[in-house]
Image: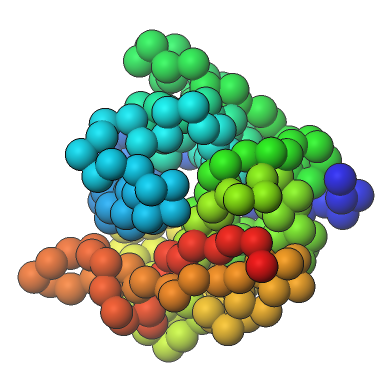
Amino acid sequence: MSNATTIRPDEAAHFGKLAADWWDPKGSSAMLHRLNPVRLRFIRSAIDTHFAANPASLKPLAGLRALDVGCGAGLLAEPLARMGASVTGVDAAHENIAAARTHAQAGGLNIDYKHGDIGALGLSGYNLVTALEVIEHVADKPAFIAALADALGDDGLMIVSTPNRTVQSRLLMVEGAERFGLIPRGTHHWDDFLTPVELHDLLADAGLKLGNPTGIAWSVAKGLHLSDDVSLNYIATATRV
């Protein structure tokens, strides 16, 4: 268990203010609703490969434990539960956890939501650990990755996504999407974005091996989609060395 805090209070407060309409596909989290199906396509493929799941199965995570860190109001935790996993969701904003619990209960889903710092909760033994669009918001990135590694079981699968620190991400995500209201203003701080090399090194220091990153790109024709282009955003697996 790490003693280093990874929570930035201002970041938790920012996302906590968005909790009330997190599940509104036309609200302040509309971009997440567009992004989530793209991420889930990658996640499902990674699950099928790592756990040798039947691609036709509706419950590829049956009998497995999943941890979603930075879960918000449960946009990823709920699909993981529907895939059969016993899910724990952790978030720094208590407002998000309250909204997540309410939404899960309304949908008949039993998800264990916890408010707090991942490094202080002592969680361990998860088959799947996810942290999507989270690491760019934490105070201590090495401590955060170490906490994720502590929570991951020996043969587990980790999935991480984050914006890349490039000219493209500055122009499209910070100057573009936030300026024109597609993403709430103040959501992103470009200097906190990680390149794939930097993420590789952080994971390596925690005894984890980064898989080949897949880009999450945007175009007028396709919208958000998986791509070989990692210049805007990327998602990748990690496993124990």
Name above or below for residue 27 compared with residue 158.
above
Residue 162 percent coordinates (x, y):
49, 65
Relative to residue 67, is residue 4 drawn left or right?
A: right
In this view, the residue in front, 149 or 101, is 149
User: Quadrant of the rendered structure where residue 221 is?
Assistant: bottom left
Q: Is residue 78 visible?
A: no
Relative to residue 135, is residue 167 drawn left or right?
A: left
Q: Is residue 197 visible?
A: yes
User: Quadrant of the rendered structure where residue 178 is?
Assistant: bottom left
- Of all residues, the one furthest to the bottom in this rendering is 167
Relative to residue 133, is residue 1 drawn left or right?
A: right
Name above or below for residue 91 compared with residue 37.
above
Residue 77 percent coordinates (x, y):
46, 34
In this view, the residue in front, 89 or 238, is 238
Residue 93 percent coordinates (x, y):
64, 37
- Of all residues, the one furthest to the left in this rendering is 221
In this view, the residue in front, 201 or 143, is 201
In this view, the residue in front, 225 or 207, is 207
| Residue at image location 55% in from the left, 54% down from the top | 158
User: Quadrant of the rendered structure where residue 109 is?
Assistant: top left
Name above or below for residue 200 compared with residue 110.
below
Name above or below for residue 168 compared with residue 91.
below
Residue 94 percent coordinates (x, y):
65, 30
| Total numbered badges shown on the rendered structure | 0
| Residue at image location 31% in from the left, 81% down from the top | 229
| Residue at image location 56% in from the left, 71% down from the top | 210
**Colour style of the rendered protein structure:** rainbow
Quarter of the picture containing the C terminus is: bottom right
| Residue at image location 70% in from the left, 60% down from the top | 145
Quarter of the picture containing the N terminus is: top right
